Structure formats: structure tokens, C-alpha cells
Amino acid sequence: MSSSPRPSKSSKPVNIKISEETQKGVYANRMIVSHTHDEFVLDFVADFPPGPQIVARVITAPRHAAALLETLRENVGRFEHRHGGIPRSSPATPKAEA
């Protein structure tokens, strides 16, 4: 397991640990999002033959989902500023709602 210092909202360093297995990551080319009143469920899917398979699931509170959305907007904007626009296509993944 490795750890790396990361700033928190209070600007104090915090050690975040990650297992070797998690550090390898998984590839996903689709995502299914569902939610209840209390949580969002993000299912990351690898869609390859013989068929799609969920490779990771993240369950989080609505306020963390909103923070994730804002963080992704900021980072996609930075990426596009450096590398040019990302082609948009209509989502092929069905949107689920609990």
C-alpha cells in the first residue's frame, strides 16, 4: 500500500492510502447512474464481448455527487483548454433512476 499527502479543505496534509489492487485501476467505457433520496450509485461498465460487466461501483451522498459534477466540469474545461474540444455524442448508456 502506498500513501500520498493531499491537501484537505482545512489545508492540512492528509495521508490517503490506496491498495495495490485499487491503484491498478479498471477501464470503463460506460457508466450507469441511479439514485435514491439518500445516495447516488455510479456503476462503471466495461462493455466488451461477450457482454457488458460492471467493473466498479461507487455509492456516495448527494452533496458529494454534486461536488464530483463540479470537479468534472472544471477538469474537462482545463483539458479542453489545453488539448481542444472533446467530441460530444449522445449517451449510449441508459440512465437509471431508483
Image: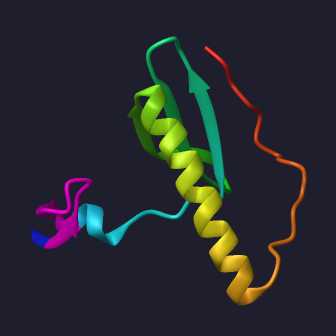
Whether residue 98 sits left or right of residue 56 in the image: it is right
Q: Residue at x 82, y 77 (%)?
A: 85
Image coords of residue 16 (percent x, y): 16, 61
Image quadrant containing the N terminus: bottom left
Magenta region: 4-20
Q: Residue at x 50, y 30 (%)?
A: 41
Residue 11 figure quarter: bottom left
Q: Is residue 13 magenta?
A: yes
Which colour assignment does the render follow? rainbow
**Residue sitting nearer the eye, 74 or 96:** 74
Q: Residue at x 69, y 88 (%)?
A: 82
Whether residue 62 sits left or right of residue 45 in the image: it is left
Image quadrant containing the C terminus: top right
Whether residue 41 sits left or right of residue 29 in the image: it is left
Q: Is residue 88 magenta?
A: no
Image coords of residue 12 (percent x, y): 13, 62
Image coords of residue 7 (percent x, y): 23, 65
Q: Does 65 appear above or below 79?
A: above
Q: Residue furthest bottom?
A: 82
**Residue sitting nearer the eye, 29 or 6:** 6
Task: Give the number of callouts.
Answer: 0
Q: Does 15 appear above or below 30?
A: below
Q: Does 93 appear above or below 46?
A: above
Image coords of residue 26 (percent x, y): 44, 63
Q: Residue at x 44, y 15 (%)?
A: 38
